[in-house]
Amino acid sequence: MRSQVSTELLFRFDFAAMGSPCVLALYVSDRQTAEKIAETAIEEVRRIEWRYSRYRSDGVLSQINRAATIGSGLSVDNETARLIDWAFLARSQSDGLFDVTTGLLRRLWNEESAAVPTDQEIANAISRIGLDKVSWNCPWLIPTRVDQNPWAQSRRPMDMIRQGWSTSLFQASQQ
């Protein structure tokens, strides 16, 4: 039996997204194909970052967070619904270890402060996160009402860990 010799080459594309360095590695036969694929993929990452950024007041996450602040539900579009479905599935399959609502924990440990959070701050944060605090009946998302304190601002039920949410978004949108 003859062995197949691959004519594919590795092409690497470095870019920044979601506050992080990113690398796209492609095995294809030529640079032109690699560049076309990379351009499409990076454009999709940028679209996702723009749409789901927690830093944009007009983004999907801000809409969800505003609903949590006033204690109301909202209807989400199909793409967001598929992501929420995925988030609940990932949480279920990981026995709760993966939960997209844990953004508040990131705020306890940050580059701007060398302070270690107290046990009380940690307990307070943990009590405020969890997809179990979100009612999901597609396409209706009803987050638990958030009170108005500095910690509550970041515990909004869908204040996602950007990397986890955004990486999963591309996978979910392709299914």
Image: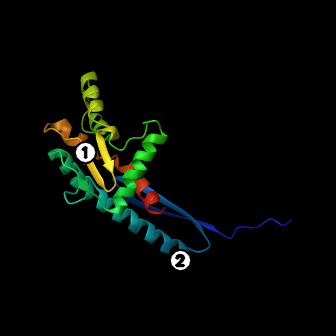
- The image position of residue 84, as x and y in percent, is 37, 52
Picture quadrant of residue 39: bottom left
> Could you say which is closer to the camera, residue 163 or residue 110?
163
Q: Which mark is residue 73?
A: none
Tag 2–tag 1 contact (CB < 8 Å): no
Which quadrant is home to the N terminus?
Answer: bottom right
- Report which residue position mark 2 lands on: 32
Residue shown at 34% from the left, 58% from the top: 80
Amino acid at the residue labelled 1: Pro
Pick the residue in front: 112 or 99: 99
Question: In the orientation shown, which residue stands out farthest toward the front?
Answer: 137
Image coordinates for residue 40, horizontal then vertical, percent = 44, 71
Picture layout, residue 35 above or below residue 130: below
Whether residue 11 is visible: yes
Up/down of 31 relative to 160, above or below:
below
**Rendering quarter of residue 45:** bottom left
Q: Which of the two residues, 8 or 96, is positioned nearer the viewer here?
A: 96
Secondary structure beneath dot 2 equals helix
Q: Nearer the viewer, mark 2 or mark 1?
A: 1
Q: Is residue 31 above or below residue 153?
A: below
Colour scheme = rainbow
Q: Which residue is mark 1?
A: 143
Is residue 116 among the parts visible in the rendering?
Answer: no
User: Dot 1, crowdedness within 10 Å: few (<14), some or many (≥20)?
Assistant: many
Using residue 54 as the reference point, say whether residue 175 is left or right of it.
Answer: right
Q: Please state if 112 lies on the left or on the right of 36 as rendered.
A: left
Q: Residue 90 placed where, x, y %? A: 45, 45
- The residue that appears at 77% across and 67% down in the rendered structure is 4
